[in-house]
Image: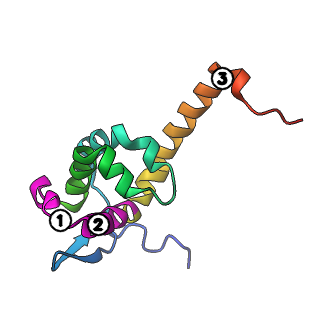
Amino acid sequence: MSDNTYAGLPPAANVIVIDGENLELTPIRVGEIPAFAGAIQPILSGLSDSEPNWVALISEHGDTVIDAIAIAARRSPEWVKGLEIDDAVRLASKVFEVNADFFIQRLLPSITVAAATLEARMPGLTQSSG
């Protein structure tokens, strides 16, 4: 049996309890990609780490992070705004985990290309292999 035996089946939901409510998180759907990608565009550099600093991202780009979490959690931004900070951080982490393939396949390549472009434009800033 190959590893792709269940590849055609919809992904199982990841359940997380937030504010006393069971949320079933699944990867974003095709129709949600434009809004989600637009929401996370300003925070892409902060998402390049395997463990993003959610508190820093929320403090620096609060509305952007709230919009992205709301889209991925399929809740309203007002609902997300009403969460305690620890619940918001746990939810953001779970959203990132559930959508890891999206981040890795879509965002990591664009971050890598951007970094390579910057490096090519600033050759004096690259480290020597000496």
Q: Which residue is mark 2?
A: 91
Q: Which residues are magenta?
A: 75-96
Q: Residue at x 42, y 73 (%)?
A: 6
Q: Could you tell which of marks 1 and 3 lies nearer the N-terminus? A: 1
Percent of width and height locating residue 116: 62, 31
- Residue 88, located in which quarter of the rendered image? bottom left
| Camera-side residue of 52 and 6 | 52
Mark 3 = which residue? 120
Q: Residue at x 35, y 57 (%)?
A: 55
The disc placed on residue 83 is 1
Q: Decide which of tag 1 and tag 2 comes sooner along the chain.
A: 1
Q: Amino acid at mark 2?
A: Leu
The secondary structure that most of the magenta stretch takes on is helix
Counting labels gives 3
For the residue carrying disc 3, how many other residues have a C-alpha within 10 Å: few (<14), some (14-19), or many (20+)? Answer: few
- Magenta span includes 76: yes
> Would you say 87 lies left or right of 116 here?
left
At label 3, the amino acid type is Ala
Residue 11 lies left or right of residue 85; in this view the side is right
